[in-house]
Amino acid sequence: MTGFPSSGKTKRSSEIQNYLVNVRDKKVIIVSENQVLAQDKNAIVSDSRKEKDVRGTLKAHVLRALNKEDVVILDAANYIKGYRYELYCASKQFKTTQCLVQSLASIEQAWEWNEARPQNERYTREVFDGLVGRYEAPNSTNRWDSPLVTLTPEMVPDLEALHDILYLSKPSPPNQSTQIQPLSSTNFLHELDRTTQEVSNCIMTAQKTLVGGDAIRVPGVEESLTLGRKVTLAEVTRARRQFISYTKMHPVEDSGKLATLFVKYLNTTLQ
């Protein structure tokens, strides 16, 4: 699921679960951010470190539940496209299908629904606006956001079509970057850190002389970095941390491919 805070994601998750369980006799597991944020959601999402920990916890729950037969619904905002990319890679790793369902409510409607909640379940206006401002809307042309099912509040979801997406389509084949491989070298983590730092340094150095949007060539990598704009050090650092975290969990056998994989990752997450 994805969408603004209080945009109806939990309601849609329940509709999907009820149909698949009661009509299609499937097992459905819902991993909900509401359970993780139960203590004080405003304090958690206002603290970037705590919010990152929540995303990590949710992802860990999803990874434990993923298999080829059951449906796992991540009922959360999932507003960062780099995070959605990681979830897409996880589904490829498990050789299972995936689908992104966007609960598309207007900001005004979502705020109205937020205000109708019990006091201890509401977002403050400041936190709500911050989450809306950080929301990176899905794009169906991105493979990690596809298939994309967009549901506005008045729409009746085509649950049969959603079932067919999950059970009748072919999963994306796993590739070198998503298959779990045994570490072939005790030096892997050092190589991962060194290579990603070198690529990051190359990008920041190249941007000092290039016009914004020019392709950046990284030595030893065939694919150019084509972002269409200049990126900040903070953006590159954040993407590097995400890539390192994922690659530690899913190391590649050939560390010589790390630079290429990192450039590919940056091309998909920094657009």
Image: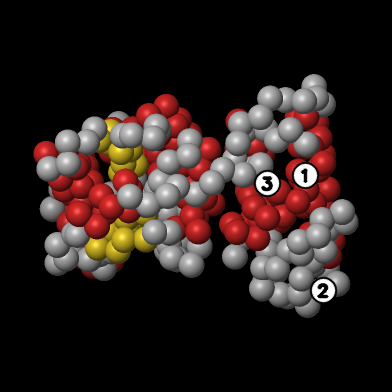
Q: Residues within 10 Å of mark 2 (few under 14, many from 20)?
A: few
Which tag is nearer the camera, tag 2 or tag 1? 1
Of the image marks 2 and 1, the number of the one nearer the N terminus: 2
Name the quadrant containing residue 226. bottom right
Q: How much space separates mark 2 and mark 3, taking CA atoms?
A: 21 Å
Question: What is the CA distance from the residue labelled 3 to the residue labelled 1?
Answer: 15 Å
Q: Amino acid at mark 3?
A: Arg
Circle 1 SS class: helix
Q: Which residue is mark 1?
A: 257
**Helix, strand or loop at disc 3?**
helix
Where 159 falls versus 195 (above or below)? below
Give whichever of discs 2 and 3 has the lower sequence position.
2
- Label ID, residue 210: 2
Which numbered tag is attached to residue 236? Answer: none
Residue 77 in the image: state x and y as whole percent.
Answer: 36, 50
Report x, y in % for residue 204.
79, 60
| Nearer to me, 198 or 114 | 198
Decide: marks 2, 1 in contact (CB < 8 A)? no
Crowdedness near tag 1: few (<14), some (14–19) or many (≥20) residues, C-alpha within 10 Å: some
According to the image, what is the colour scheme of the structure? Answer: secondary structure
Tell me residue 158's x, y (percent): 19, 59
Locate residue 111: give its quadrant. bottom left
Which numbered dot is residue 240?
3
Mark 2 lies on a secondary structure that is: loop
| Amino acid, disc 1 | Lys
Q: Residue drawn at (25%, 50%), measured in percent from left and top?
A: 163
